[in-house]
């Protein structure tokens, strides 16, 4: 039986960390990535390889995916989890901060998807799991920029699902909350 290979972003804490551990417990080999590699060290195991990665660095994303392919020869699951919440009233959050929210939460996900998709297409299988939020479906005062970024993740995921379904690639959105 072929061991399944997963890439989990934002694996240093919370949902990303729990997902990494659960996948490893279920016989996946997991590449756990985060900006702060030292926060990943305690979850390193024979089924969890930790790598420092900032999802804002497109070249580094491609390097990680190339490393996965060179060492394991396949990628079965991408869990896009890296992100953060920019809270504050729409008029009070600077445009620089709003842009950064989208860069991390939307374009970081998109760059990771673009990096793994050629390999999943060649395999004719794979699963991309994008973490969103219930706020991706509706918004609340003070959460506008965060909710907008999560809504964008849901829209991209829905479009991608239609683009790759016939190739055996699933796209899943998880919206905690």
Image: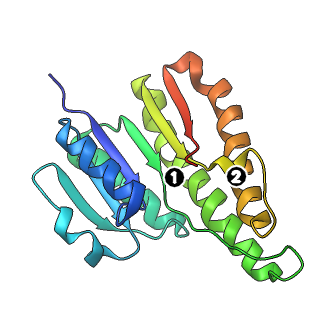
Q: Is residue 2 left or right of residue 147?
A: left
Q: Is residue 99 left or right of residue 54?
A: right
Numbered tag placed on residue 56 in the rendering: none
> Relative to residue 128, is residue 39 depicted above or below?
below
Q: Quadrant of residue 63?
A: bottom left
Q: Residue at x 44, y 46 (%)?
A: 79
What residue did someone put label 2 on?
Answer: 135
Residue 12, position in %: x, y?
A: 34, 66
Quadrant that contains the N terminus: top left
Q: Is residue 64 left or right of residue 49?
A: right
What residue did someone put label 1 on?
Answer: 112
Q: Quadrant of residue 6?
A: top left
Q: Residue at x 48, y 19 (%)?
A: 168
The secondary element bearing badge 1 is classed as helix
Residue 71, position in %: x, y?
A: 21, 48
Q: Nearer the viewer, residue 27 or 125?
A: 27
Q: Identify the colour scheme used.
A: rainbow
Residue 141, position in %: x, y?
A: 81, 65
> Which of pointers 1 and 2 lies earlier in the amino acid sequence?
1
Q: Nearer the viewer, mark 1 or mark 2?
A: 2
The secondary element bearing badge 2 is classed as helix
Q: Residue at x 58, y 60 (%)?
A: 108
> Relative to residue 60, is residue 117 depicted above or below?
above
Residue 160, position in %: x, y?
A: 65, 34
Q: Is residue 21 visible?
A: yes
């Amino acid at each position: 039986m072929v061991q399944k290979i997963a890439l989990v972003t934002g694996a240093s804490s919370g949902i990303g960390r729990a997902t990494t551990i659960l996948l490893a417990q279920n016989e996946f080999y997991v590449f756990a990535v985060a900006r702060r590699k030292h926060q990943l060290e305690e979850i390193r195991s024979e089924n969890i390889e930790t790598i420092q990665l900032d999802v804002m660095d497109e070249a580094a994303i491609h390097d990680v995916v190339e490393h996965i392919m060179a060492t394991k020869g396949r990628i079965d699951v991408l869990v896009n989890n890296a992100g953060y919440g920019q809270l504050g009233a729409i008029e009070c959050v600077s445009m620089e901060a709003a842009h950064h929210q989208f860069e991390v939460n939307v374009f970081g996900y998109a760059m990771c998807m673009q990096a793994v998709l050629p390999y999943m297409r060649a395999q004719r299988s794979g699963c991309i799991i994008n973490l969103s939020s219930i706020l991706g479906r509706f918004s609340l005062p003070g959460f506008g920029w965060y909710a907008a970024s999560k809504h964008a993740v849901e829209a991209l995921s829905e479009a991608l699902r239609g683009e790759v379904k016939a190739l055996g690639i699933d796209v899943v959105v998880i919206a905690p909350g």
